[in-house]
Amino acid sequence: MMELQSALGMVFDWQVLLVVLAASVFGLFIGAIPGLTATTATALLVPLTFFMDPLPAIGAIVSATAMAIVAGDIPGALLRIPGTPASAAYTDEAYLMGRQGHIGQALGINLLCSVLGGVIGVAILAFFAPLVADFAIQFTSDEYFWLALLGLSCAVLVSGADPLKGAISMLLGLLISMVGLSSASGQMRFTFGIPELLNGISILPVLIGLFAIAELLRRLPEVGKLSMPTPPPVQKPFAGVAGITWRYKGGVARSGVLGTLIGALPGAGADIASWISYALARKVSKTPEKFGTGHPEGLVSASSANNAALSGAYIPALVFGIPGDTITAIIIGVLMMKGITPGPDVFTTDTVLVYAIFIIFLLANLLLLPLGLLAVRSARHILAVPSAVLYPLILLFCIVGAYANNNSMLDVAIMLILGLVAYVLAENRFPIGPMILAVILGPIIESNFLRSMIKANGDLTMLLDRPIAIGLGTLALLAWLSILLSSCWSIRRASHVARSSSP
Amino acid sequence: MRINDLVFGVLMVLLGTVTVWASRDFPSMPRQEYGAGTFPTLIGLLLVLFGVVLALRGWQRREALFHWQSAIPVSHVLLCIAALVAATLGYILLTPVLGFPLMSVAMLTAMIGWLSGGRWRLATSTALIATLLIWLTFVELLRVPLSLGFLEEVIYG
């Protein structure tokens, strides 16, 4: 009880609250602008969180992402352009509801169900994370090695239709993480004679490059070429929303739980959770024929699921230090910069911080309601901000943000190079998620492997000596085998396609 | 721009080979074969393997090596990329000389003015306000030493 009180004391500090509020408004703005995602919002926030204590830093990221996912629903419903990929599953449904004169209702459902889904996710997180941590406390470097490897392979498998490109993107990320002094032997690796690279490539310029600069490169050519339609006015955002949500309360509960579980899987995040929940809602619905015509049932399920997934992703991140998606990868990066390595020990040694993080989660999700309403009301003004003004500002912010971490121009150059690489790769359908996960997981995998080898005197079979390690190892090896097989299979498929298309 | 997978595959094979070659001398830990070179070598080998698969697949599809499919003309896209690169490189090279305030105002004014199709008054005012805000946030609040360049001598000299 004492711990809960001190945690409340930590959270209800005016500086922390101010940070949470400001980050929410920032997330709201970025999420509502089509093309800028919750991950972009996080990447832009990270330079500032670098200067904060751990709690406000996490609070800022949590509230900005939750708000960005909700705000992403707004351009989806108004203009049929999803603000973030997590809203894409139900953009058509919400837009069609708007066409039938229920725009306020559609956005109200988005908002209310996001809050409900988010709260369900937080409840599951707060309940399960300590239990899993109790279990994880017996893990040794063997289990962590397999777990991190499993996380990496799942990230590749769920990253898109082409696991081969996901695997290559992951390998490039691992390569980035190898630069600098080796943690085990102090060997200099790939530093090209640049002393600043001895500590490795810092995570900040990598993040900003991959998620903000690459996005700018994609969006910049559209300025002035693609005109944004004027959004219709929103009337009565909450009329009838409570009734509809109550009618589909089963859907909210189901999607909240499902979304949290999907979020907890490595690699799968809010976007996948909302697609799957939408599909499941259609399958179990009494009126599946109404889906896709402006029917609120799918909307209820999918908007609950994507916010629940955000909380779910923190279960593996907080308990094992293994990120479940790009956003938690960023959070782990931020915590490591502050000298905190997330893991089961944190639950026993720093219970107050863990409680405080849970409270921040709840607070961020409850803040969605008033701020979301504000966002719906001000949507027309946010969407009217000219991108010709916005994008140069984001660029300057990226540059200063990348510089601020180490006061180093080299970081700015790294940001630019990786931004260009990520842009070219993404244009050619290489997923970028596995790359950032690999940058974070690479050192974890390597140091745990080498630690195990020191213990086992170089005997590889010792990695599979303990029961949990065998289970995790089998899963990881199966996942890697399926990546290899599906890559080789894709050659055969390509030759079939080529043969059938040529005369 | 769509680049054939063959090109990417070959690039990955090259990158993997260089990685394996560069990791050949990394020492292993005492009394065992694993060490600083294990992971870089493994990553390099996997890059070669996946690169070969990607290249074979791209070759079998028999598509053009490069092709353009966007609605926006290629020259405009390249111009935008060049502008972003030039702005960032310009910042890296010129900020130590000109100082952050001048560089930031110049860069923002030029980019906003260009992108908005010549609304220079909007561009200049946004640039001035944004530069001031960033200066206050990063230098005054967060104590990041953004360079003043030659202004330092003008102000303090």
Image (cartoon, coloured by chain):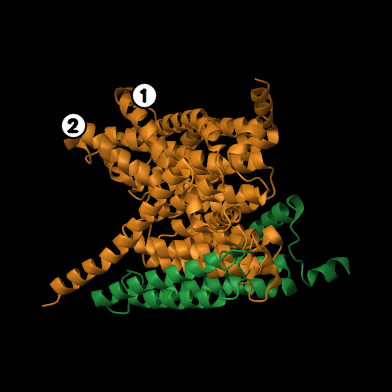
Chain colours: A orange, B green
Secondary structure of the residue carrying tag 2 is: loop
Residue under the point 66% across and 30% down:
A352
Which image quarter holds the N terminus of chain A? top right
In-image side of A464 versus B96 (left or right): left
Up the image or down, A429 lies above or below A454; here it is below
Q: Disc 1, disc 2: CB below 8 Å?
A: no
Which mark is on residue A242?
1
Mark 1 or 2, nearer chain start: 1
Is residue A385 rendered to the left or right of residue A451?
A: left
Percent coordinates x, y for residue A378 in the rendering = 47, 41
Answer with left or right where residue A295 lies relative to residue A240.
left
Residue A365, given in percent of the width and then of the height, sits at: 50, 33
A289 versus A442 height, above or below: above
Instruction: Please report, as a chain letter, where disc 1 is located.
Output: A
Quick check: can you spot residue B85?
A: yes
Is disc 1 surrounded by few (<14), some (14 to 19) or many (20+) residues within 10 Å?
Answer: some
Residue nearer the viewer, A191 or A70:
A191
Residue A216 at x, y percent in the picture: 49, 62
Please state which of residues A448 and A5 is positioned toward the viewer in this rendering: A448
Residue pointed to by mark 2: A287
User: Disc 2 residue type?
Assistant: Thr
Q: Is residue A378 visible?
A: no
On whether disc 1 and disc 2 are found on a single subunit, the reply is yes
